Image (tube, helix red, strand yellow):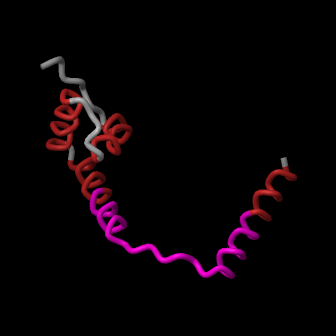
């Protein structure tokens, strides 16, 4: 195997999503796991993020009623147009 990369808390946060998705190369994955094993702060962030993802993956989406969706889109357009004219 190659040289293990030194992981900081910031680099862990930068790579956490790819780690959770299983998209990291072996050396980087091993380095992240070593960091997680010794850093309680990153472990908490990782654990809570993983739990949150699981909750929302299991959540059944319900479409907005048409009138609510229309009001939401109108409000968003007003906000976007207002910000553009303020620039």
Quadrant assignment, res 51: bottom left
Instruction: Give the residues drawn in magenta, as a range.
Output: 50-76
Is residue 46 part of the magenta span, yes or no? no
Quadrant assignment, res 39: top left
Residue 10, given in percent of the width and then of the height, sits at 36, 37
Quadrant of the snapshot with the N terminus: top left
- Residue furthest toward the left? 1
Is residue 72 part of the magenta span, yes or no? yes
Q: Is residue 10 above or below residue 52?
A: above
Tell me what residue is drawn at x 33 percent, y 63 percent: 52
Q: Is residue 85 above or below residue 67?
A: above
Tell me what residue is drawn at x 15 percent, y 36 percent: 34
Q: Is residue 31 above or below residue 56?
A: above
- Residue furthest toward the top? 2
Tell me what residue is drawn at x 17 percent, y 39 percent: 33
Position of 60 with respect to 87 (left or right) is left
Q: How many marks?
A: 0
Quadrant assignment, res 32: top left
Which secondary structure dominates the residues rendered in magenta? helix
Residue 17, given in percent of the width and then of the height, sits at 35, 45
Between 24 and 10, the one nearer to me in the picture: 24
Between 84 and 39, the one nearer to me in the picture: 84
Residue 43, given in percent of the width and then of the height, sits at 23, 50
Position of 84 with respect to 4 (left or right) is right
Tell me what residue is drawn at x 57 percent, y 77 percent: 64
């Amino acid at each position: 195997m190659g040289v293990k990369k030194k992981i900081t808390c910031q680099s862990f946060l930068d790579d956490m999503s790819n780690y959770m998705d299983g998209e990291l190369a072996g050396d980087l994955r091993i380095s992240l796991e070593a960091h997680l094993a010794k850093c309680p702060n990153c472990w908490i962030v990782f654990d809570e993020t993983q739990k949150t993802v699981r909750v929302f993956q299991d959540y059944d989406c319900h479409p907005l009623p048409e009138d609510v969706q229309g009001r939401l889109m109108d409000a968003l357009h007003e906000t976007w147009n207002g910000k553009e004219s303020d620039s």
